[in-house]
Structure formats: C-alpha cells, structure tokens
Image: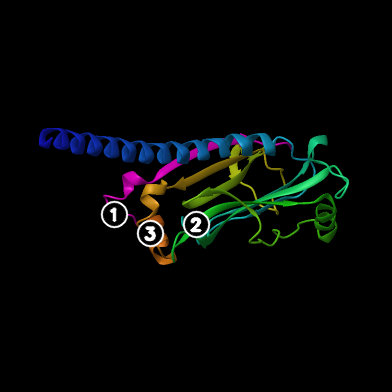
Amino acid sequence: MAITTVIMVVLLGIVNQSTDTYNRTQRAVNSLSQSRAFLQFFDREISTRLPQTPLIHEAGTGNTPDLSDKFAFVRTISTEEQSNTTPGDLGTTAYYLAYTDAKGDAVAPRLYRKVLTPAQTQDLLDSSPTPSFPAPNPADEAIIDNILSFQARPKFIDPAAGEIKDWDKNSTEPAAFIELTIRFVQESTSRRFKTKSEWERLASSPTEDEIPLIQTFSRTIAIAK
C-alpha cells in the first residue's frame, strides 16, 4: 500500500505539471492567435474603407500604451451588418488603447474597437472636413489584452520626390498604405504587472530579462484612396 501510495502521488504530480504546462501553452497560443487574427481582421476591414472620406489619425508620441496611436476610418457596411434600428450603409471604426481593470486591483492596457452607427457616422462627416477622433467609451469592444503599444501609421508616396512619407491631415496626397504594429505580452507574463506605472516602465524600458517576453507583430496594409 505504501508503494502504491507513492506511485499515485508521483503520477498526480506529473498530471498536475502537465496540466499547468498545457494551460500556459494554451494561453500563449491564444495571445498569438488573437494578435494574428486582429491583423487579418484589420486588413479585411480597412479594405471596405470608403474612398474620399476622412482618415482620422492621432499619432502617438511614444512607445507606451498612453502614447500610442489612435486610428479611425469610414467604411461601407455589409447587408448583414445593417439593421432596422440603425438604417444606413456607412459606419466608422476606431481603434485605440486604454487601461481597464484586470483581476483583483490590477489594471491592464487593452486594444479597443469602437463602432459608430450610420447616423453617428453622418454626424462625424458633417462636423468637419477633418473630424476629431471619436470619444472612447467603456462599453467599446476590447480586442486584445496586454498591449504595450499600437501604431497605425498612414504613409503616402510623394510623386515629386518619389519618396514614402508620413501622412497627416494636411498632406497633399492621399494615404496609400498603413504600417501597422502591435507590441504585447502573454497573459502569464502580464500577471507580474499590476499598475499603470509598471506597464509604462515595461513598454518604455524593459530589462534584459523582460525583452524576450515582448512580442511584436507588424504588417503593411494598402488602403483605398
């Protein structure tokens, strides 16, 4: 009986260790899949942008959540997305980072997606030739957790110089493509960071041990002019 008990304890330990390893691996896979899926989703969504409508871009000034880009565009809405309560075939999609409550007393930076109805989109277009970024709302959809920075940099090709340059609302040429970059950490890593200042420090000046924990995905995406 003593030998059987020892064997059972060892087997249970192996099973628990395997379960923990599986859970950690699954969380890592989920984080990577979530980020890859976002890049593909963004690519498909920006392909429905309505040409000749304002591109709304507030360039971030740093490589941290608080100083990340804000990006929005007007797009056509498919028949499946339309409803009787909000009639119309135009919508606006906006992306931005914000801190929200996590487990316990912790906070974490998340990438959010805001969607304006056709009526709200029309109000946005009527407000100005260069409208401001739509106001964030806690009810907006959280897309990816534990995002250290989000960059969506519109670029245009200067025909005179034949060079690629940063686009802004004062550019004489329309934006031709977007350089999209997200930096994030996996869920298992995120548990180490509880406060806004800890996240900012990780994003701006990670230690040598923390650098391998940060993953970066980038994609260049063409947009309709």
Q: Nearer the viewer, mark 2 or mark 1?
A: 2
> 221 and 91: which one is in front?
91
Which of the 4 quarters of the picture holds residue 11?
top left
Real-space Cα distance between discs 3 and 1? Answer: 14 Å
Q: Give whichever of discs 3 and 2 has the lower sequence position.
A: 2
Q: Is the residue marked by circle 3 packed among few (<14), some (14-19), or many (20+) residues within 10 Å?
A: some
- According to the picture, the residue beneath numbered tag 2 turns out to be 109
| Residue 78 seen in render | no
Name the quadrant of the N terminus: top left
Q: Nearer the viewer, mark 3 or mark 1?
A: 3
Residue 207: which numbered mark, if any?
1
> 12 and 86: which one is in front?
12
Q: What amino acid is at disc 3?
A: Phe
Establish if 180 lies above or below 104.
Answer: above
Establish if 137 lies above or below 38.
Answer: below
Q: Is the residue marked by circle 2 packed among few (<14), some (14-19), or many (20+) residues within 10 Å?
A: many
User: x, y percentage for residue 153?
Assistant: 58, 47
Magenta stretch: give its range.
205-225
Q: What amino acid is at disc 2?
A: Pro
